[in-house]
Each structure stands twice: as structure tokens, then as C-alpha cells.
Amino acid sequence: MTAFDRLWVWDDPAFAESLGWYLAVAGNRKPAKFRIAGTVPVAVSLADAGEDGLWQEFERLTPVFLARLGRIRDEGAALGAPAPGASLLDLCRELSQRMLGHCNFCRWNCRVDRSKGAKVGTCKLGGETRVSTYFHHQGEELIYRGRLGSGTIFFTSCNMRCAFCQNGDISTDKDNGIVVDARTLATMAWLLRMEGCHNVNWVGGEVTIHLHTIVEAIALLGGALARPSRADLQIALRAKGDPFFVSNLAPEQASYDGAFNAPMLWNSNFFMTDEAMKILRPLIDVWLPDFKFGPGRCAITLARTPHYWEAVTGNLALIHDWGEDFTIRHLVMPNHVACCTKPVLDWVAENVPEAPVNIMGQYHPDNFCDPGNPKYQARYAELARRPSGGEMRAAFGYAHDLGLNFESISYEKNVMGLWQ
Ligand code: SF4
């Protein structure tokens, strides 16, 4: 048992049960899902098959993968050998590359060919991926940050336009950070885990818009990137946001059955397509969806994002139906408890009642909602303050009355007064 396993939070059966797979992978008692996907052989030529043929093969292999996952998770079955040729992991990579040619990663469904970079969609991105910074994040929930931090990699740009974005420097500046290819990205993830991080936390901006590079990086972690070279590390270290000590690398904290292992955490606004969700299913060990806006017009007026409610609730229902490990975040916004917080919590109570929910009080005026920022726009005056104590108490009280599982995960920070 590791120090991470001994954290008090795991004494709460609600966490131990709903995040059991994540915890086992974090402690290297189980292989991450991408390792299992690497053992499932593909029966078509990835280079020659058309995209429809690749999807047919994917649909054929998904039950095979799930059966193998179930045996490993529930019966203690061995991982097995990597597939001799192409695997489901490679198929996920190939599909995400094909999708880039008519981008439908997210619900905007722009259908532009991002691989050539001549046209861009709402996210403003071509085929390039940029990382703003990456480090041991000590500000995530205890279940993710543990003692040594969540291995968080911040990508630039976003597919939503939240006027109050709390990461505006990253999400609104698509040229922030450094350009990374899949190998550099895999090196960053490898390094964070080797340094003791409890997970690889893919976040932005928004991650979905970088699906092709992330999936390729995960595929490398599952095979070709046994150990990054000195040159790989030198490139990756250009964006590292915290100290790096070679002497602190601890492979025993990062391996299962002799190869790299780490839980993959998808930290996203969840404004994704079914196709993106499907590709991620065999790769992601724990999901961290952000569920912000109610079903009214707030997603449009504050984030210029239509179809928000249908897309996000649809994807939340999917991971629930799939039996995935996940926790939900809800950021309480000033003056939006009635229109956003309460309907969001109602939906959770009705549809995914056992899910741990972090009701977050750290909203601060930022970006277009910060009167101290030159970008400030008076039409967002309702968002130009922190949520009040009364609003936070109303949110917590409502969640309590609904019987939601939110206290442990929400209070461990709020008792420190970070929302006041
Ligand atoms: S990621 Fe989303 S916003 Fe960007 S081009 Fe693709 S569909 Fe459009």
C-alpha cells in the first residue's frame, strides 16, 4: 500500500467505490487502460483501410477490450502480451488522425481539414499542438493531487468562449507555450509520472481540441517510448513549470509488469462528439468533466456555446452508463445559482446520483469580467465579483438536500476559506 492509498479521503466508501479503478492504476496494482488496449490485436491494415472500415473494426474490438478489462479488474487476470502487430491503441491513434482531416473532435463539428492548417474552426487551431506549461499540480482535488501532485499538462486554446475564463491566458492565446509533437508530449507525461505524480492530467484551455496529439502520445507511452532520450528530455523541459531532479526519478512508482504505467485523467469541458468519447473510452482511466451552465441561455450569453446542455449531459450520461470512474466539477458563479448551479445539481441527482461532485467556490472575476483588466466589458458586470458566502451556502445546502456526494471533495478546500 502506498502513501497515496493511505490518504484519509479513501476511507470514504463513496470515493473508494466510485474511483476504485483509478486508485488501483495509480498504485500500479492494475495496468492503465491504454496498456490493455495495447494487447488487443487489430485485424485490418491501418494504412489501407478507409475510415468507415476503421470504425467497424473499432466497434468490433470495443467489446473485446471491455471483456479483457473486466477480467483484469474483477478477476485479477494477467495483462497479457502486447499485440504482435497493430493494436487497439494504434487504431485509436489512426482514427484520431483521420478525424483531424475533417475535424469533428468537439460538438462544433467544424468539419475543417486541420491537418493542412489552411482552414481553422472555432478553436482556431490547425494540426499543431501547443503546451503552455506542465507541472505537479498541488491545487487539484486531494484524490488527484495526493501528496506529490497531479501530473498536469496545460494545452492552449479552447472551443468555448467563457467570458470569465479562469485560465484566460492559456485559453484565449492559441500561440501560448511551445509547439509539441506526440513524442515531446509523451516525454512530459513520462517525466511527471516518474517524478511521482499520481496521474497524467490532460487539461487546457481545452484538451479535446488536441485529441490527435494526445492519443498519439498515449500510444507512444504504450509502446515505442520505453524511455525518453536525453534530447527528448531537453526539448520537453523547455515548458516544465517546476523543478526537475533527475535523482528523484522513481520507476517503481510508474510501472506495471515492467513497463510504463499511469492513470490517464481527462480534465475537460466535455463539449465533445460521440466519436471523440468512443476513442477515449479504451484510454482514459478517470474522467473529470466540468459542468458549468444550466439548460437556459447562459452557455450562449456567457460562453457563446450553443448545444452546451445536450452535449455535456449526453457525455456525462455516457460515462455513467459505461461504468467509468469520474468526478464532476461545478464552479459556482455569482448571480448564477438559480439558473446554473441548481439545474446542474438537479441533473446530477437525477441521472448520476452517486458521482462525487466538487462544488467549487474559487471563482474570481477574470478575463472580460474583471474590472481591473483592460479587456473588461460592462455587460458582464453580474460576474465581476466572487460568489458570496450566501450563494455558496445556498449551493451546498441545495446539494445536501438532494443527497449528493459532495461534502468531502468540496469542503476540503472551502473550509480553508478560499471562496471568500
Ligand atoms: S476541435 Fe472542435 S472547434 Fe476545433 S476545429 Fe474541431 S470541431 Fe471545430
Image: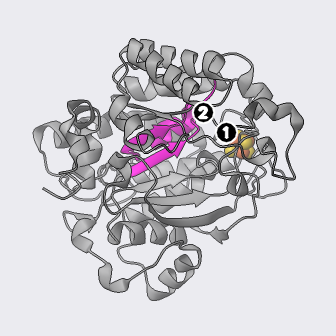
Sequence-earlier tag: 2 or 1: 1
Residue drawn at (33%, 50%) of the image: 41
Q: Residue at x 38, y 23 (%)?
A: 321
Asked which quadrant contains residue 65, the reply is top left
Q: Residue at x 48, y 27 (%)?
A: 316
**Helix, strand or loop at mark 1:** loop
Neighbourhood count class around disc 2 (C-alpha, 10 Å): few under 14, some 14–19, many 20 upward: some
Between 371 and 166, the residue placed more toward the observer is 371
Q: CA distance from mark 2 to mark 1?
A: 7 Å
Residue range of the region highlighted in magenta in the rendering = 264-293
Measuring from the top left, give residue 37's x and y in whole percent. 34, 49
Q: Is residue 391 left or right of residue 78?
A: right
**Labels 2 & 1 near each other (Cβ < 8 A):** yes
Q: Nearer the viewer, residue 387 or 61?
A: 387
> Residue 231's x, y, as percent?
51, 87
Specify whether 127 is left or right of 248. Answer: right
Magenta span has 274?
A: yes
Q: Which residue is mark 1?
A: 104
Q: Quadrant of the N terminus?
A: bottom left
Q: Position of residue 263 (x, y in %)?
A: 34, 52
Which corner quadrant of the figure contains ligand 1? top right
User: Mark 1: which amino acid?
Assistant: Asn
Q: Is residue 174 magenta?
A: no
Q: Secondary structure at mark 2?
A: loop
Percent of width and height locating residue 153: 52, 60
Type of residue at label 2?
Thr
